[in-house]
Image (cartoon, rainbow, N blue to C red):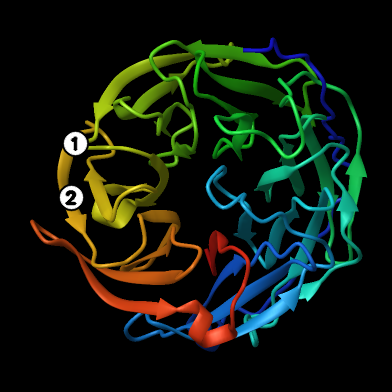
Amino acid sequence: MRSSQLLSFIAINVGVTYSLAYPRDSQHRQNRAAYFQDNGSAGNSIVALQISSSDGTLSNPVRTSTGGEGLAGLLAISQDSVVVDDHYLFTVNAGDDTFSLFTISGDDPEHPKLAGKPLPTLGQTPVSVAYSPELQTACVLNSGSTAGISCFSISPTAPHPREVSAPLPKSSSTPPPRPLVIGADITFNPSSTALFATIANGTQAGTIYAYPIKNGHISTTPVISSFPTLSFTFSLNFLDDSDTHLLVTNPHLNSSGAAFVSVSYPSLEITLAKTITIPGQTASCWAAYAPQFDTVYVMDAARPKITALNPETGDVKGQVSFPAAAAGGLDSRVDRDWLYMLTSDSNDPKINVFEIVGGTELLKQVQSLDIFQQVGKIPDLMGMAIWPN
């Protein structure tokens, strides 16, 4: 494989901060919405759906332009392409290399409002986004031939870029090839003292980049940890509000499927704590954590099966199959007692809704929403976020 060159942009300098006052009465707590993007190359859109407060089902989809362009075919290469936090929604536009910020009204969460214009991400093929309310900063992971991280100071009116350089491997082309050498996920730790990004590499050791944060500033020098047995480090999932305990998915064919890794502070060195073998795994990419049920769910993009894990021991609690023409499950989120999951068949996409029932049954499917029937044919379903999160 061609050796990777180190190129990137990372933007961070937390400047003026802003605060928003939003009512927190029972009516606003009842209004809930789920979001994904259609990844349309002729014009990307966020699709919002109303969530029933009683049974968790989805209805009344509404499309809102992101102001940018998607890139069809990216549906299976990243986690966190759509993120909701506070009253903000963040998303990436991989087709024109931009980042969009929306504000969400508690009275009408199905109609997010674009805040300013989409901003260039200072790289190519942005695939994932992370937000820190403490820092009021959002960071985007670029994965094309100009790879790296760009960050934005967030306000209710518009994002503002900050620039500073830092290394990340680049892809050999834009859009990235498959098998992938690509950034897959980016996230802040719960305390916002470090920023983490995964590099998914199907032929070499998987890699996690960790950037220290001191006095509100993100370092330009990452701590790089490699894992020879995790050849395809994909999604990053902090568990139990812990800065040290992460689940990393490893969807490479014939791999174990997932692992626990542990972060040491202040060094930010990351070590493999436990390899988790997911029975029959083919492409275990996405994970969704349900702390109230003491369970983390791992979706397999290549088969219609969800694996439930103990978030402390990694033991497999069980596996749940779902009837679908789709190959498997993609982006997923937990909201209260329900799990929301996109399916991976671009010709017949669904959003499957499962009630989390626990015990040996684990999940009970309560809805399979036909997206094409609801909003017409769209290029790709990508990302999944819930408000309030």
At horizontal 74% and vertical 47% (from top left) the residue drawn is: 138
Q: Read off the residue under disc 2.
A: 319
Q: Read off the residue under disc 1.
A: 279
Is 80 placed above or below 3 here? Answer: below
Kind of residue sitting beneath label 1: Pro
Q: Nearer the viewer, residue 25 or 136?
A: 136
- Tell me: 331 left or right of 156: left
Kind of residue sitting beneath label 2: Gln
Is 274 placed above or below 189 here? Answer: above
- Tell me: 142 left or right of 307: right
Q: Is residue 388 visible?
A: yes
Quadrant of image for the N terminus: top right
- Tell me: 145 left or right of 27: right
- Tell me: 73 left or right of 359: right
Q: Secondary structure at mark 2?
A: strand
**Among the two numbered marks 2 and 1 on one chain, the one whose residue lies closer to the N terminus:** 1
Q: Is residue 216 visible?
A: no
Evaluate if marks 2 and 1 touch, with contact meaning CB atoms under 8 Å apart. yes
Q: Secondary structure at mark 1?
A: loop
